[in-house]
Structures are given as C-alpha cells and as structure tokens.
Image (cartoon, rainbow, N blue to C red):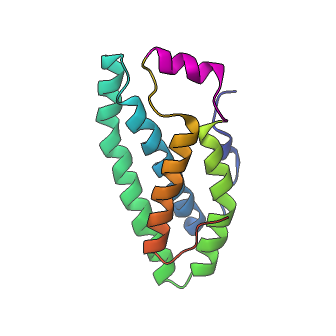
Amino acid sequence: DQRLAVFNYPLRGWCDAVVQTMLLSRAALCQVNDMSRMSYQPAAEAFRAVAPLIESHVLAADAGVAICLNAGEGETAQGSLDYWWPRVSLCFGGEETQRERAQFSMGLKHMSNSDQRRQWETEAGQALAKLKLKKPQ
C-alpha cells in the first residue's frame, strides 16, 4: 500500500478538513515545485502544469480556515492544527536515504526531505501567523 498515511485518518468536520487541506496542499506544493526542476523534462513540465492547481488549493484552504475563524471556531482550528501538523509532516519521509541519494544523482530531486520539510514548516508557519494561529511545537 503506497498511499499516504495522512489519508487514513478521519476528518472531524468542515473546519478540520480545511485545516488539513491548508497544511497538506502546502506540503504537496513544496514537493511538486522540487519535482518541476527534475532532469526528465516531460515529467518536469507535467509537474509545472500541476503547480498552479495546487496553489489554488492553498488559497482556497486559507480562505476556508479564515471562514472558520470568523465563525468563532478558533479553538477548533487550533486543535485541528495540533492534530494534523505531525501527520502531514510525515509526508516528507525520513532523513536522507539511499533512494534519495540516487534521486539526487539522477537529477530527479534537488531538495532533501529535510529541506522540504523545513520549507513547509516555514511557509505554513507564516500562513498561520497571518491568521493568528499558533504553529504546533
């Protein structure tokens, strides 16, 4: 089973779903942006074509979280952030592996799992700060 484990967890309402999407779409964008620079140009072009769609998911999720907050669901949103943050973080995989080194050597990957995770944490943290939510520890 190669599905992301994050999809095995239940969503607990609309606010929970938009918070998960807010985090997961940013994670996907970090990964797609890296893959759009790969050496195999047909795949890189496909990833570049997909990136704007994922960016639209980021914007829609941010708007959805703002709606939750305006509806007085700040505590619910923060609880969802605390729940989803570590689960979405796992999407980046572990530390450097043999597979990752092989991908670097073939030009299929340019950023390490750790660097992508840090980029995601920074970008998600900035989005949360704009919404006056706290990045989980």
Residue 30, by quadrant, is top left
Question: Relative to residue 65, is residue 109 depicted above or below?
Answer: above
Side of 8 relative to 54 (left or right): right
Residue 14, by quadrant, is bottom right
Question: Relative to residue 128, is residue 119 depicted above or below?
Answer: above
Horizontal and vertical percent position of residue 41: 30, 18
Question: Relative to residue 72, is residue 13 depicted above or below?
Answer: above
Decide whether residue 104 is among the magenta residues.
Answer: yes
Q: Give the residues in magenta.
A: 94-106
Instruction: Between residue 115 and residue 77, name the one nearer to us.
Output: 115
Instruction: Between residue 96 and residue 91, name the one nearer to us.
Output: 96
Q: Residue at x 55, y 63 (%)?
A: 19
Instruction: Between residue 111 and residue 9, name the one nearer to us.
Output: 111
Q: Residue at x 30, y 33 (%)?
A: 48
Instruction: Between residue 80 and residue 89, name the one nearer to us.
Output: 89
Seen from this angle, which residue lies furthest bottom? 72
Decide whether residue 58 is among the magenta residues.
Answer: no
Q: Quadrant of the C terminus?
A: bottom right
Q: Quadrant of the N terminus?
A: top right
**Number of marks drawn:** 0
Magenta segment main secondary structure: helix
Q: Residue at x 54, y 74 (%)?
A: 133
Horizontal and vertical percent position of residue 91: 61, 41
Horizontal and vertical percent position of residue 104: 49, 21
Horizontal and vertical percent position of residue 129: 48, 72
Side of 88 relative to 66 (left or right): right
Question: Relative to residue 126, is residue 96 depicted above or below?
Answer: above
